[in-house]
Image (cartoon, rainbow, N blue to C red):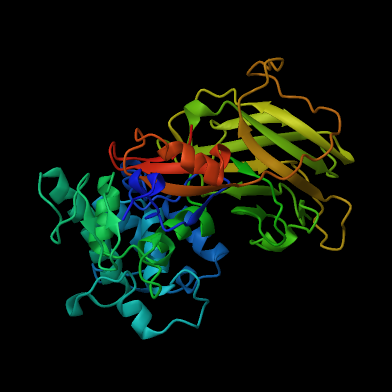
Amino acid sequence: MKTSKKTACCILFVIMCLIFITPAHGTISNKDNIISDDEFRNCQSMIQNDIQKFLVNQNCFLATYKTADVDGVKKLPSEMIYNAAQKYHINPKVILTMLQKEQSIISTAPGKQITSQLNKAMGYESSDHQGLSKQIDRGTWQLNHNIERIDAGKTTINGWTIRVAKETVDHVIVTPETKATASLYSYNPLAGAGWGGSKKWGANYLFWDLYYNKFEFSAKTSWEFNTPANSEGWLAYNAGILNEATNVQSDGLFIIDPIGPDPWIENILCSIDASSVDGIKIRMSSNCEDDTGAIYFSTEESPGFGEDKKVGFGVSHGSEWHEYDIPISNSNWKGTITALRIDPADFGSESSESHDDTFGFDYIRLSGVPAETDTPPDEVATPDSPTTPPAPAQSTTYATYCVEDPRIDGAIEWAKNKIGPAEGRYYDKESGQTSMALP
């Protein structure tokens, strides 16, 4: 039987003909590289207060639940998670994601939790380590221990390491590119339905989806507020209630109604490389009476907000919308930025009946400072004239094909004709490189 050229060039449609969506933060779904080692090990990404705020914002029962920790002392789970993160050098965001992936802990509302959830909170299978505190401690220990074995030149206890292909229990070939990825597959050796594995389990694909999409724990650099009732991780304070997610309107505006002085919004889920960002662009309207705003930031090296980590900017009072290009002129803007706070005004009405002091955001974007902007450190940026809201940012859809050897005549050309170079990526088995754009 004659083999066609298309078959001979071995463009293995092994990649499941899945369509991978590039999220707004730019992270592409990759079963071989779920998370970088640096991010996995970033145990300073959240302090306990950040973890507590996150749990409150998620309406999670852990926000008020207290139980004995492994040392026998009753504590809030936010403290247990923080302590385990420091003890084993694992990112607390990873621990939070594992709690949701294994037993839907984070999305369980107060009073809805059941004992079986708590006994297997992080999916650590041991009758000697049942209960929330033991699960958090031992599960985090295991994630760290897996990496320690790889660092020592060994595989994990069930054979995972980096750059060595291995088949998951649900029959997907994975070649971990990071120790963190190998650790996750060792912890749970299933790829999951999203990566062509068992349709019964979310597994490691679910971890990826929760971390980058649901919780948006990655290095997000813009917030467009285009989805109603989704504040994209921003919380409002001195505005009546803690969680202002319902204040995102259908027209793509995040509207806040202060009920007291010093209203602000903050986002504690940041992971920003300060060296790549030297400005913040905000489109905002403020009916508050004063004309001075401020941006505060927290860093991995210096957690918490403070006057030493502050950038001021001028605010135009009134109902019109203005775009502000704010240079980050502060020497403490360095390392990893872990949280942002925006104070659009110092004053707000103390009456909940008054609605004449509202302020709102159309978008918040981290970027480079425009060349014509040159604001000295001791001055503040001035607002531009009102502008028209830009079109919502669009995600990019990629089809991915597996190419045995892209040097084979016609292989790449066939894929380009099939899906188009702008929408195509391939996995080259010869070089081991992934997510390569079609030329």
The answer to whether 237 is drawn above or below residue 153 in the figure is below
User: Which of the two residues, 243 or 160, is positioned nearer the viewer here?
Assistant: 160
At x 81%, y 62%, the residue is 352
State the image coordinates of residue 344 (x, y, percent, origin top left): 73, 41
The part of the image, by quadrant, that contains residue 157 is bottom left
> Is 317 placed left or right of 232 in the picture?
right
At x 44%, y 74%, the residue is 65
The part of the image, by quadrant, that contains residue 417 is top right
> Is 148 placed left or right of 10 in the picture?
left
State the image coordinates of residue 390 (x, y, percent, origin top left): 77, 39
User: Which of the two residues, 88 or 392, is positioned nearer the viewer here?
Assistant: 392
State the image coordinates of residue 255 (x, y, percent, origin top left): 77, 53
> Is 238 placed left or right of 143 in the picture?
right
Farthest-out residue, front: 1
* Residue 25 seen in the current view: no
User: Which of the two residues, 58 or 416, is positioned nearer the viewer here?
Assistant: 416
Q: For the N terminus, which image quadrant?
A: bottom left
Total residue callouts? 0
* Residue 107 seen in the current view: yes
State the image coordinates of residue 381 (x, y, percent, origin top left): 73, 24
The answer to whether 171 is drawn above or below residue 12 in the figure is below
